[in-house]
Image (spheres, rainbow, N blue to C red):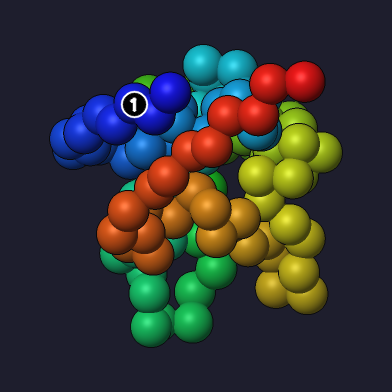
Amino acid sequence: MTRRYKIKITKTREFVSLFNGIFKLSPKEIEIISEFIDMAAKLRGTGINPFSTEIKKKVSDNLGRDDFNTLNNYIKSLADKRAISKTDNGYNIHPMLLPEQVDKIEFHLIHE
């Protein structure tokens, strides 16, 4: 049986949540990576890595955190879960989690 659903996604957090069965992120990790994804979109073409110290400070402020260094624990966890990957300049966000790179998503469920 085939079922099709149309879901209107208006926020990055909603988009990331669609893939949580793959990445198994906590609600706080979803909130944090969503903020980094939004920052990455704003920084596109500038050469600034969204995981730089300067941007981590902005993300921390946006999330209402007092100390941006607390994000490092979440960044490590996101890397361990392969939602982000380490590069020479910082980290890259997994392409699957970037909403602007997707027009349509199809899920195929396989029962074993």
Label 1 Cα neighbours within 10 Å, binned few <14 / some 14-19 / many ≥20: few
Kindly indicate the quadrant of the structure image that contains residue 77. Answer: top right
User: Is residue 64 at least partly visible in the picture?
Assistant: yes
The picture places residue 65, in percent across and down from the top left corner, at 46, 24
Of all residues shown, which one is farthest toward the front?
A: 1
In the foreground, 111 or 95? 111
In the foreground, 83 or 50? 83
Image quarter hosting the C terminus = top right
Residue under the image location 37 percent in, 37 percent down:
15
The amino acid type, in three-letter code, at marker 1 is Arg
The picture places residue 22, in percent across and down from the top left corner, at 65, 33
Left or right: where 7 falls relative to 84 = left
User: Is residue 57 at least partly visible in the picture?
Assistant: no
Residue under the image location 65 percent in, 29 percent down:
110
Residue under the image location 77 percent in, 60 percent down:
86
Residue 99 higher or lower than 74, as above or below: below
The picture places residue 104, in percent across and down from the top left corner, at 32, 53
Of all residues shown, which one is farthest toward the top?
A: 27
In the foreground, 11 or 55? 11
Kindly indicate the quadrant of the structure image that contains residue 78. Answer: top right
Q: Which residue is mark 1?
A: 3
Image quarter hosting the N terminus = top left
Kindly indicate the quadrant of the structure image that contains residue 102. Answer: bottom left
Left or right: where 37 falls relative to 27 = left
Residue 105 higher or lower than 80, as above or below: below
The picture places residue 26, in percent across and down from the top left corner, at 60, 17
- Please, what secondary structure does the residue beneath circle 1 have? loop
Left or right: where 8 falls relative to 91 = left
Residue under the image location 40 percent in, 81 percent down:
46
